[in-house]
Image (spheres, helix red, strand yellow):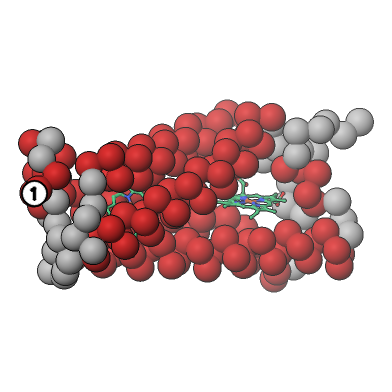
Amino acid sequence: MKQYSKRMVIVHWLTLALLIAAWFLGDSLADATDDSKATLAGYITHIAAGAAILLLTVTRLLFRSQDGTPPAMGLTAMDKVARGIHHALYTALFVLPVSGVLTLATSDAGKALLAGDANLLPKKDGYEHVFAHGMHEQLVTVLIVLVAVHLLGAIKHQFITKDDLMSRMLLRRKA
Ligand code: HEM
Ligand code: HEM
């Protein structure tokens, strides 16, 4: 096997797109909360993007166990770091949405959504003592740093090592 299976490639790039959406929606939600103007629709769209990422990550791990992965590019320390980053990315893609669910479960946001009443949603400083919310925020930063390092690695392979690593994560099949 020289490349990731087609379905692994599709899920990889779909996850990137959903991550950008969830990040943007989450940030807008936090701004709205700071202005005490958050809406149920704002919560629902952010939760939908986040939940899709969680579902996709579980599906992806199933595909991975069935389809396998191309062999490691090499055995250097950098190759081992790259693999460590991949595992950390999978962990973050799972734990981050779970911390979002915990934020709902341990704050007034969950009650507001269940009651369908936007007046019950947390207002400015409403998440101050919600531990899971702090965790959710920190994990967003962790994930962004991991993705940045991962992206730098891909750029290094593409433009410095020029070893065609990118083609392993593209739909076009190599002969
Ligand atoms: C990988 C998926 C996700 C990403 C990238 C993400 C990202 C974010 C971001 C950037 C914020 C704003 C943090 C802040 O500065 O206060 C946020 C807030 C929040 N997220 Fe997520 N999130 C994800 C998944 C979820 C899920 C699945 C849920 C719930 C089921 C959820 C529930 C929340 C809640 C309740 C808030 C607080 C809103 C507020 O501060 O007003 N998130 N998220
Ligand atoms: C930002 C643009 C991105 C580029 C250019 C990129 C590129 C790549 C490439 C070329 C590979 C194959 C590496 C190899 O064969 O050893 C890969 C694998 C991987 N990427 Fe990305 N990626 C990006 C974004 C992301 C994002 C946002 C995530 C998740 C948050 C992610 C998670 C992964 C994981 C977990 C693997 C390992 C797959 C496995 O072995 O199961 N990538 N990426």
Q: Dot 1: within a 10 Å radius of its alpha carbon, few (fewer than 14), some, or many (20 or more) residues?
A: some
Q: How many marks?
A: 1
> Which one is nearer the viewer's eye here, 23 or 10?
23
> Which one is nearer the viewer's eye here, 69 or 111?
111
> Which one is nearer the viewer's eye here, 110 or 156?
110
Q: Is residue 116 above or below residue 99?
A: above
Say whether residue 153 is left or right of residue 19: right
Horizontal and vertical percent position of residue 79? 70, 63
Say whether residue 175 is left or right of residue 54: right
Horizontal and vertical percent position of residue 30? 30, 60
Q: Is residue 24 visible?
A: yes
Give the residue at x 45% y 54%: 24
Give the residue at x 83% y 59%: 158
Give the residue at x 8% y 49%: 120
Question: What residue does disc 1 label?
Answer: 120
Horizontal and vertical percent position of residue 131? 18, 65
> Which one is nearer the viewer's eye here, 58 or 97?
97
Find numbered disc 1 in the image and state the secondary structure of the residue it sits on. helix
* Amino acid type for the residue under numbered disc 1: Leu
Please tell me in which quarter of the rendered image ligand 1 is found: bottom left
Say whether residue 6 is left or right of residue 105: right
Horizontal and vertical percent position of residue 42? 30, 45
Quadrant of the rendered image containing residue 175: top right
The reply to whether the residue tagged 1 has its Cβ within 8 angstroms of ligand 1 is no
Give the residue at x 12% y 35%: 116
Q: Residue furthest right?
A: 175
Q: Is residue 68 visible?
A: no
In which quadrant of the rendered image does the N terminus lie? top right
Say whether residue 137 is left or right of residue 82: left
